[in-house]
């Protein structure tokens, strides 16, 4: 299911878990093909900045989570991913990974993806293949400690994965303004999403940057300065949770999408809904989201479209 605008954009705006139970069989992954926007963005990050995207706490064993993710991917998208318990294949890329070995499936295997995966550190090549085969980024949430000990996040939304890995869920969200509900719910949320059911939630923002990869170290300077609102971007995340049996963990999937704000807010009803949500944000929330300096202009722009 794509981003659910009406479910996600609410007034008054509050940082909260916002979990929604997924129906059995609901799709959680999005296969991509070489040349797609997500594939190009991920390939660029994994080729040039892999240590900022692929992060784990020392000694953490991601094997159960990776196996659960591989099984889920194969069941959900058998044409895009196969898994026999030891060897993963991504037919669209023409590549397979078994252990730390990367194998071309045919002479037409994607050369750039092959070179990228072969250059990754041992232990990360299966995660790399998953990252290039699907639009989603991935993280592991440990229910017992509520920490995030493992990340494969090439397309972060204005945060640095290498600074978040290993931190408790509450600490990861500590900088988020208006986050009291989220922090209080951390332990219960971790237990819930690592249970037998599958869940989703949605996140959104308005951004001056249209790139899928938004690591703060690589964003262009300038931000909102001199940027007309017609050139702004609507950035969304659909986040889902895939439980990892037997270890009280969940694989956290993050599907980032960006589109021009004017296109995303294409009706008066959407403009009014977003206007109400942004108008309800306090100063701390606006500052955290980088909207403080553009708040008035953004509300005027939306009001003109209501």
Image (tube, rainbow, N blue to C red):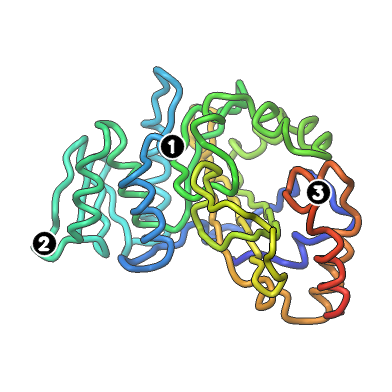
Which quadrant holds the N terminus?
bottom right
Report the mark closest to the observer, 2 or 1.
1
Question: For residue 106, which numbered disc appears in the image?
Answer: 2
Q: Mark 3 or mark 1, which is nearer the start of the sequence?
A: 1
Which quadrant holds the C terminus?
bottom right
Q: Mark 1 or mark 2, which is nearer the start of the sequence?
A: 1
**Placement of 239 over or under 208, stated as above or below:** above
In the rendered structure, the answer to whether residue 303 lies left or right of residue 240 reads right
Report the mark closest to the observer, 3 or 2.
3
- Residue at 87 percent across and 71 percent down: it is 300
Count numbered badges in the picture: 3
- Residue at 51 percent across and 60 percent down: it is 211
How many C-alpha atoms fall within 10 Å of the one at disc 2: few (<14), some, or many (≥20)? few
Question: For residue 286, which numbered disc appears in the image?
Answer: 3
How many C-alpha atoms fall within 10 Å of the one at disc 3: few (<14), some, or many (≥20)? some
Residue at image mark 1:
52
> In 3D space, how far apart are the residues under numbered discs 3 and 2 (Cα atoms)?
51 Å
Residue farthest along the top direction in this orientation: 59
Of residue 106 and residue 222, the one placed in the foreground of this image is: 222
In the rendered structure, the answer to whether residue 146 lies left or right of residue 302 reads left
């Amino acid at each position: 299911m794509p981003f659910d605008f009406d479910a996600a954009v609410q007034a008054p705006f509050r940082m909260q878990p916002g979990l929604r139970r997924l129906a059995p069989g609901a799709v959680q992954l999005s296969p991509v093909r070489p040349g797609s926007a997500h594939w190009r963005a991920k390939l660029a990050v994994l080729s040039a900045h892999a240590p900022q995207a692929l992060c784990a706490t020392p000694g953490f064993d991601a094997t159960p989570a990776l196996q659960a993710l591989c099984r889920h991917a194969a069941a959900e998208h058998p044409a895009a991913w196969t898994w026999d318990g030891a060897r993963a294949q991504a037919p669209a890329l023409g590549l397979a990974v078994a252990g730390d070995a990367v194998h071309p499936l045919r002479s037409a295997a994607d050369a750039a993806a092959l070179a990228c995966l072969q250059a990754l550190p041992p232990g990360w090549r299966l995660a790399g293949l998953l990252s290039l085969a699907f639009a989603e980024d991935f993280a592991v949430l440990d229910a017992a400690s509520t920490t995030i000990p493992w990340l494969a996040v090439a397309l972060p939304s204005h945060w640095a994965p290498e600074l978040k890995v290993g931190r408790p869920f509450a600490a990861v969200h500590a900088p988020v303004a208006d986050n009291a509900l989220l922090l209080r719910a951390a332990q219960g949320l971790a237990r819930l999403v690592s249970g037998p059911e599958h869940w989703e939630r949605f996140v959104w923002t308005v951004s001056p940057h249209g790139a899928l990869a938004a690591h703060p170290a690589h964003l262009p300077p300038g931000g909102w300065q001199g940027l007309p609102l017609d050139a702004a971007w609507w950035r969304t995340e659909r986040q889902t949770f895939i439980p990892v049996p037997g270890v009280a963990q969940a694989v956290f999937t993050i599907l980032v999408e960006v589109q021009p704000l004017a296109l995303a807010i294409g009706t008066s009803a959407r403009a009014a809904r977003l206007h109400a949500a942004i108008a309800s944000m306090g100063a701390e929330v606006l500052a955290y989201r980088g909207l403080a300096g553009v708040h008035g202009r953004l509300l005027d722009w939306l009001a003109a479209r209501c």
